[in-house]
Amino acid sequence: MTEIDNSEKPFLCDRDQSVHMAGGASGENGRWKAPVSRDGEVQISGLENTAEEGVKQDQHKVIYTVEDVPPIYMWPVYALQQTLLCVSGTISVPFLISTYVCAGHLPEVRAQLLSIALFMCGVSTLLQTTIGVRLPIIQDADEERWMIRMREIGGSLMVASLTQVVLGCTGMVGVLLRFIGPLTICPAIALIGLGFTSAVYNYAEKHWGAAMLTSAVVLVFSMWLGRKQVPVPSWSRERGCHTTRFPVFVVVSVLLGVAFGWFFCLILTVSGALPNNSTEPAYWARTDVNVHVIGQVPWFQIPYPFQFGMPTVSVAGFFGMFMAIVSSVLESIGDYYGTARVAEAPPPPPHAINRGIAIEGICSVISGMVGAGHATTSYSNSLAAISVTRVASRRVFQTTGVIMLVMGVLTKVGAIMTLIPEPVIGGLNAVLLGTLIAVGFSTLSYVDMTSPRNVTVVGVTFMLGLAVPQWINSAPNRISTGNEMADQIITVCLGTPMFFGGVLGAILDNIVPGTPEERGISKLQRTMTSDSSKKELSGPDNFIPGDLPTIDPTCLTGGGKGSKENDTARRPGEYEYDWFVEVLEDKDDVTVDEIKTVIYGVNDLPPVYMWPIYGLQQAFMCVSGALSVPFIISSYICADQLPEVRAQLLNITFFMCGVATLLQTTFGIRLPIVQGASYAFLPPIVAMMQLERWRCPAPDQVQPDDDEPWVIRIREIQGNLLLASLTQVLLGCTGVVGLLLRFIGPVTIAPTIALIGMGFTSAVTDYAQYHWGVSGLTAGLVLVFSLWLGRLQVPVPSWSKEQGCHTTRFPIFIVISVLLAVGFGWLFCFILTSADALPTNSTELEYRARTDINIHVVNQAPWFQFPYPFQFGIPTVSLAGFFGMFMATLSSVLESMGDYYAAARVSGAPPPPPHAVNRGIAIEGFSSVISGLVGAGHATTSYSGNVAAIAVTQVASRPVFQVAGLILVLLGVLTKVGAIMTLIPEPVIGGLNAVLLGTLIAVGIATLSYVDMTSPRNVTVLGVTFMLGLAIPQWVNAAPGRISTGSDKADQILLVLLGTPMFVGGILGAVLDNISPGTPEERGITKWQQKMTSDSTEMSEDKKKEKDRAVSDIYDLPLISGWLRRWRCCSFVPFLPSFNGFRAPKPKRSRNKSARNGTAVNAYDNTSYQPDAYGNSTRF
């Protein structure tokens, strides 16, 4: 990169060498963030914006500021660049609107909507730059509003937009922002994209090849070729006409993607490769379908008010639009500040912000009047274009508005755009709507996602924000209050993911106890405010805020500083926010003395009579987490109406949790970790059971096999689970885990884990639909006990070596919050059953909420039954099932490794050495093999909740966790226990699933805290990954017959893999993350490595020896470790304590005195071996 002269710093606030903004280029329709270099230039797709060598000193300055006037003949040239950006973001909106107003196959209507959209973008830009906020900012179609499904779009949009005018004119925006933080903004934005997966596959299914080509071309031009600077004609006051290098591919990446996809479809059309029959999906990939529209539409047509008739208004539509307004206002405010920064203008004063919001509302009212079908809002990508072109002149942006006005009046332009094949629009939506998802997630960089409070709030919000609207929209007549208007309001509000998730997030965030720092409020405010006493404002005194309570438009601070205060600042061209680093800030692994001690460490022995008490706490937490897994499995193996089967699966689950815990704590990682039922294996099980051969038969259907349907299906799950678990054993025993993790980072792990929960919304609605009141009560009680009462310390009997028997205060509610919620939900259903408030007819939905349905199972079940191998018959195996299970295995391995390091930290133990990690993975695989043999239907994995419980109980003794394993084994053998649990009403399970599966979503999203989410590269990769990770499985599972290769086995493999969100998202994330250009810091690899490893090179020799002894005492195998070290060949076995890398060091260096004395060889001494990036494998 060209050296930069920092003698002049027009972007700086005081002596700060960074620009801190709230709005920026986060991909298409990006909000809130813009990666900025230390020298003050916004970056697009990691691009280093440099000018020619001859103008080094001016390259960080804009050529034309807001008030400057370029030569008139240059206005159209500069304006055309902004116009192309706006058209790129606008083009897909009218296509989507036409689909939902029953005009999807009326190209003339689509052409008219396109023209109106461009016209309104021009009008809005002119009004905003002239009398609104008066900053150089483009107005574009607002995707927060067209997603509201309703007939009265125009009228409802007008009325709702009037409220935005009121917000701006009265200055109420600041008051509103007091109750809205990142935990509200995140779901409100992300659920827009997550709720529109159908907008991808409904278009892409016409020709997936053309759709994926379009998406790929957009990614190539924006992330790869976007870094290339192309010579283009330019002009400056100093040099006149000259040639400069300009990243043209970034600016027109979307248009180039559309053009390539369009051209590909043209070739297929001309060659006759596409059908001529309109009933075939591929017909709509043709480029000549709508040619007649060009000849039919007039050359000119000016949109006018009420051209489609008088708008109608509904209360339901207004409520839906209002949430969109709030979301749009928040994003626009961020864009205003960002534009001022990039344009070298003073921060906008309150009156300008209020006026800008009001003008946006007025423009949206006009949009409703002329029938645009959408509102307009500020377009963040124009901010990035200013830093690239270095032209911020208001005149240029007003010219842009005029150009778009002309394009809107020229209806032939809209008609030409209707020729774009539908698959191309599908590929475009995958990128644009996917980016919205990632932009929403990126707002969580303000939030402390290590807080259980935030993880729970985010998880429940996303799970219910997806599940409830899907349930409502699948059959709108589900809402029946007796009042038609009330039904419409509830249906629209509950059927809109953005509205429901945003409102739920706002409620939970404001009523659940939490500090401003924890909630991210403080960090969000620091991006919008600064201490004016330390800064000198430029401009008039009225720039000092007064009428905008929570927005201080002074010089923004708190950003990454290229100084000693922020040693995470990277090379010029990249930027990192200080609040992001603050969330992630964590100590490197330290010595045993420096770690906060627990009452009982791993090797400590509490009094024997206390073992069952401490062990019971951990067993209860495991039961809470594992309870819903057998319920879900039974519903997919055609046993949902067989409570005795569910009881048997519950017993086997508890039994296997106990066996796995005993094996792991004794021979595996040997840390205090409880093993439980793995949710990661549920998605492939569901995908397998949706194959035609495994679908549940009709009640009167004759079965070719003598065995019951559920037995045949559990065998298939057993066999594939057994085979996939053997691969996990191999991964651990061979040490290949470390090699595998070199290609897997947070950008891969986040969608892999989060999509497990997102793909299981039906596990909530299928149970909750029997009685939403009971489900809501159960989920609410989990939150009350864990987030409110969990902070209360209850007096309980205790014992310690110092005080003996005494009373101590213990947060009992948080330990058994799930069990208490289940108990109260169960009791509520019992009361309703006893009071005859629930129907006795089994055909009615609420019948399943009764507590006496399965009472006969308790009487029939024996007292004891020991699970044994092949009790359901010989397992069967399929290639499709194995591939699905294998992906779940990889996900489980990644999750478990994080738990190992977390357990070590919480327990006051040194980080586990490679041999212990390898052995832990192998033992988990071995336990899962046993699960497959006895028919559990799921694998076992480490439970993060039990790791967190150690911090609460301060008990990390290994014997305590071994006792917990014995208790779980006992519960599994007592079959009456499983039979009693089948009495739990199904709505209670639905409420429980909403919290537990929602937590999986939040845990996955929390992994992004390692990643630089200010990078458009990461926003694009994650957005596309999440969007296609949901859209493709939904499309495949909706009609499995769509996959037809001519080979049944190939069809089954593809159906299972492509029908599993975790697999599609994980593979796509890994591929894009590894092939897209990006630094390790940008990808989150560096921070993740620091979290997972430690560096002992600076330790004293005594400290090293102390750590070696601690490692040996905790992680070595019992009894035989000293004997194993005598054999040099054992140092080559990855799971044995003497393992020291595959390239064995020289004897003199590897066999030191401590080794001869039988203690551990220094596992963290880099002179002995070099651990890999994750500390889980050694040299290969």
Image (cartoon, helix red, strand yellow):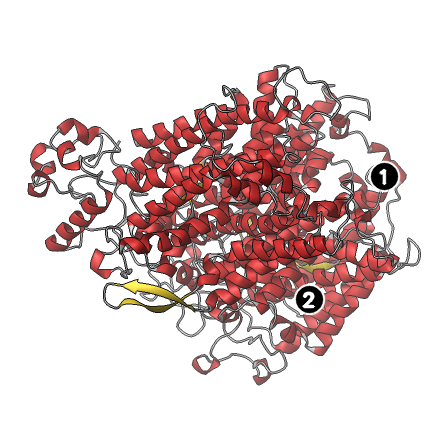
Task: Please say whether residue 28 is visible from this viewpoint.
Answer: no
- Say above or below: 302 vs 743: below
780 or 154, which is in the foreground? 780
Residue lying furthest right: 309
Residue 608 pos. (x, y %): 28, 53
Give the mark nearer the N terminus: 2 vs 1. 1
> What number is the disc on residue 129?
2
Q: Amino acid at mark 2?
A: Thr
- Say above or below: 405 vs 196: below
Residue 282, quarter of picture: top right
Within-10-Å neighbours for mark 1: few <14, some 14–19, many 20+:
some
Task: Please say whether residue 487 is visible from this viewpoint.
Answer: yes
What residue did someone put label 1 on? 106
Horizontally, residue 811 falls left or right of residue 248, namely left
Residue 249 pos. (x, y %): 56, 43
373 or 112, which is in the foreground? 373
Q: Amino acid at mark 1?
A: Leu
Horizontally, residue 892 falls left or right of residue 976, namely left
SS label for mark 1? loop
Circles 2 and 1, Cβ within 8 Å, touching? The answer is no
Q: Residue at x 6, y 35 (%)?
A: 1148
